[in-house]
């Protein structure tokens, strides 16, 4: 943690705080990469295996993130960034009034955006696993009636459009927040640090070493148990 005082401008001193842990950053950028792969391969029947593999890996990443929302350091925990309506409205008023306040982790709006994206990804993956079309069958499609499998294929398509829309809104929010707050949110998700006012409570980014492997192994076992049904 380093301090940076700007006495010339009279602004309060700032500190560089480690916020995003390595596990969370790997999850974030791994999810971005795999989503692109799944999206590109999804409309090409010849690349079905790649689409399936990327989708299954995404499921594992999302399950890890859900576990990490309870085992991870404070900025990664759902209890830290899922706030009530009052906090969301207050944050909106701050943005509209040009009074953006930098926070160690996700702001109230960004926190709910993360949760919505996670839920939509789960819908996308599970609908794909059980879907059936003329081109391919999901690995678990045989466990549901044909009509349901066909309906889930439609859900898979419609939910993707909704997910893309939410992702665009999320990217716009990241750009607006970065501009108003004079902070590079993309860079902070790469190196894991944020520059915050010294009066801000430092983020607790340290955790017991065993929690990461436990979350990873748990996610892998859950995905394996689900896919073993198709064998």
Image (cartoon, helix red, strand yellow):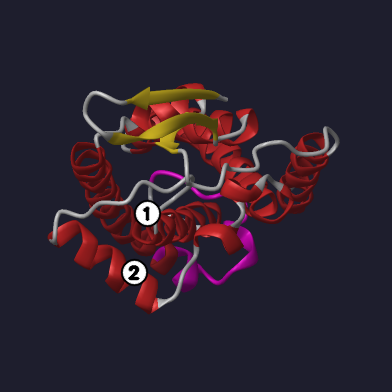
The location of residue 192, given as percent across then percent down, is: 51, 28
Q: Is residue 32 left or right of residue 1?
A: left
Indicate the secondary structure of the residue bearing disc 1.
helix
Give the answer, above or below, for where 141 lies relative to 230: below
The residue sitting at 43% across, 53% down in the picture is 114
The residue sitting at 28% across, 54% down in the picture is 166
| Residue 94 seen in the current view | yes
Whether residue 166 is in magenta: the answer is no
Q: What is the quadrant of residue 79 in the picture?
A: bottom right
Residues 122 and 2: in front is 2
Start-end of magenta stretch: 135-150
Callout 1 crowding tier (Cα within 10 Å): few <14, some 14–19, many ≥20: some
Whether residue 139 is in magenta: the answer is yes
Image quarter hosting the N terminus: top right
Label drawn at residue 110: 1
Give the answer, above or below, for where 93 lies relative to 202: below
The location of residue 179, given as percent across then percent down, is: 19, 37
Residues 68 and 51: in front is 68
What residue did someone put label 2 on? 88
Give the answer, above or below, for where 158 lies relative to 168: below
Judged from this view, the residue extending furthest toward the left is 97
Count of numbered badges drawn on the protein:
2
Indicate the secondary structure of the residue bearing disc 2.
helix
Callout 2 crowding tier (Cα within 10 Å): few <14, some 14–19, many ≥20: some
The location of residue 85, given as percent across then percent down, is: 37, 77
Q: Is residue 1 left or right of residue 170?
A: right
């Amino acid at each position: 943690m380093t301090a940076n005082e700007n006495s010339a401008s009279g602004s309060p001193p700032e500190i560089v705080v480690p916020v995003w842990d390595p596990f969370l950053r790997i999850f974030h950028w791994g999810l971005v990469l795999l989503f692109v792969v799944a999206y590109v391969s999804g409309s090409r029947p010849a690349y079905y295996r790649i689409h399936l593999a990327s989708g299954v890996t995404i499921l594992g990443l999302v399950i890890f993130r859900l576990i990490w929302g309870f085992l991870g350091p404070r900025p990664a925990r759902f209890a830290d960034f899922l706030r009530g309506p009052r906090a969301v409205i207050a944050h909106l008023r701050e943005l509209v009034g040009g009074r953006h306040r930098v926070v160690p982790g996700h702001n109230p709006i960004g926190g709910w955006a993360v949760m919505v994206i996670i839920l939509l990804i789960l819908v996308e993956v599970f609908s794909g696993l059980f879907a059936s079309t003329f081109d391919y069958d999901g690995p678990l499609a045989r466990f549901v009636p044909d009509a349901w499998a066909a309906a889930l294929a439609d859900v898979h398509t419609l939910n993707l459009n909704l997910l893309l829309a939410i992702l665009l809104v999320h990217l716009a929010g990241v750009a607006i927040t970065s501009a108003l707050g004079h902070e590079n949110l993309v860079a902070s998700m790469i190196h894991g640090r944020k520059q915050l006012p010294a009066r801000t409570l430092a983020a607790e980014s340290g955790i017991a070493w065993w929690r990461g492997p436990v979350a990873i192994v748990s996610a892998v076992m859950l995905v394996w148990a689900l896919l073993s049904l198709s064998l």
